[in-house]
């Protein structure tokens, strides 16, 4: 006996979109950006959207769930199930949008192909969406633009040499001639981090450093002008040796997300600071010269590593 169609199924035409992008990163890295929740959350969704919920069970039959938050504060849940995972070549998954009560708005299926082009990766996305209501039929009119913006964010996020920040972010990257485990250790060992943290001319007095999710890192930076700058951070993610995330809870508030990527015997560190708004970011840059400070801080780490 044939199953009955769900209400709305077949009443509204489906839409298919195919988009291709070239990412300045190796295929394995780009594939992981689709299958690791901490990476997926950084780029999924249109510009100015964030993803406060991002859950991934990356295996055939495993589920994923994302709640996107728009710049107006509205939330847009979506979820699906992985049908195929062929690392690092191919992903096939369902992607369904639902309303606040969990009712289906859009039923979709997406295939992503990852093609190695030397050190770069060609990403080809093919997605098909079927609206389940008249409102959803209007929503998918913007499907191509939404996916295009998502893949532009992916391209920027995986660019190893030229990470492009949003208007709320500061991003700096540096390649160190040291193995990833050592570079990571320099961030979580108080005896090491006290020797390099901060711009040139600054020193550090660490009061507390509890390297665990929810742990507190509290310290005072002593400037060359003899001014003290109290700092308090709370660790959010400890994923040794790949990633560190902590929230800076003293003003100016922001989140710092640091990734450690092995490139042979070297390590590429990308530090991304995300502020509550573009205005706060700009104020921080102007008042504290934060962009240059971040660059100098990573440079001091490089100087210390060169002595080991």
Image: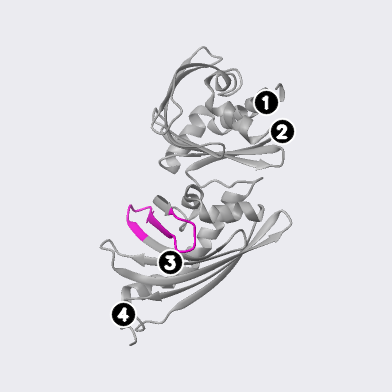
Residue pictured at 59% horizontal, 22% vertical: 196
* Residue matched to label 1: 305
The quadrant of the picture occupied by the C terminus is top right
Answer whether residue 162 is visible to the viewer in this image: yes
Residue pictured at 38% horizontal, 70% vertical: 139
Answer whether residue 295 is visible to the viewer in this image: no
Colouring rule applied to residues = one colour
Quadrant for residue 303, please give it: top right
Say the numbered circle drawn on residue 95: 3
The residue carrying pointer 1 sits among few (fewer than 14), some (14 to 19) or many (20 or more) residues within 10 Å by Cα, namely some
Q: Circles 3 and 1: CB distance less than 8 Å?
A: no
Q: CA distance from mark 4 to mark 3?
A: 17 Å
Location of residue 69 with respect to 91 vertically, above or below: above
Residue pictured at 65% horizontal, 41% vertical: 262
The residue carrying pointer 2 sits among few (fewer than 14), some (14 to 19) or many (20 or more) residues within 10 Å by Cα, namely some
Q: Earlier in the sequence, mark 4 or mark 2?
A: 4
Q: Earlier in the sequence, mark 3 or mark 1?
A: 3
* Residue matched to label 2: 177
Q: CA distance from mark 3 to mark 1?
A: 45 Å
Q: Earlier in the sequence, mark 4 or mark 1?
A: 4
Q: Circles 4 and 1: CB distance less than 8 Å?
A: no
Q: Which x, y percent locates residue 103?
A: 28, 68
Disc 2 is placed on an element classified as: loop
Q: Circles 2 and 1: CB distance less than 8 Å?
A: yes
Say the numbered circle drawn on residue 190: none
Q: CA distance from mark 2 to mark 1?
A: 8 Å
The residue carrying pointer 3 sits among few (fewer than 14), some (14 to 19) or many (20 or more) residues within 10 Å by Cα, namely many
């Amino acid at each position: 006996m044939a199953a009955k169609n769900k209400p709305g199924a077949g009443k509204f035409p489906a839409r298919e979109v195919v988009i291709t992008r070239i990412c300045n990163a190796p295929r394995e890295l780009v594939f992981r950006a689709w299958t690791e929740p901490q990476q997926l959350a950084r780029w999924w969704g249109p510009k100015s959207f964030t993803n406060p919920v991002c859950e991934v069970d990356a295996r055939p039959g495993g589920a994923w769930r994302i709640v996107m938050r728009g710049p107006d504060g509205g939330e847009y849940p979506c979820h699906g199930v992985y049908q195929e995972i062929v690392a690092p070549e191919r992903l096939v998954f369902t992607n369904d949008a639902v309303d606040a009560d969990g009712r289906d708005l859009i039923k979709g299926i997406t295939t992503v192909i990852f093609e190695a082009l030397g050190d770069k990766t060609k990403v080809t996305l093919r997605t098909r969406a079927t609206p389940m209501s008249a409102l959803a039929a209007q929503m998918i009119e913007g499907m191509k633009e939404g996916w295009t913006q998502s893949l532009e964010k992916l391209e920027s996020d995986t660019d190893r040499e030229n990470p492009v920040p949003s208007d709320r972010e500061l991003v700096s990257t540096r390649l160190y001639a040291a193995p990833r485990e050592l570079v990571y250790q320099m961030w979580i060992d108080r005896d090491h981090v006290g020797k390099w943290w901060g711009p040139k001319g600054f020193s550090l007095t660490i009061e507390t450093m509890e390297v665990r999710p929810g742990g507190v890192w509290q310290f005072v930076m002593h400037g060359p002008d003899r001014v003290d700058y109290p700092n308090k951070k709370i660790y959010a993610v400890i994923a040794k040796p790949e990633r560190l995330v902590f929230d800076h809870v003293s003003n100016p508030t922001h989140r710092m997300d640091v990734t450690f990527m092995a490139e042979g015997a070297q390590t590429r560190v990308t530090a991304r600071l995300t502020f509550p708004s573009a205005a706060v970011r700009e104020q921080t840059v102007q008042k504290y010269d934060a962009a240059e400070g971040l660059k100098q801080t990573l440079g001091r780490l490089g100087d210390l590593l060169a002595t080991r």
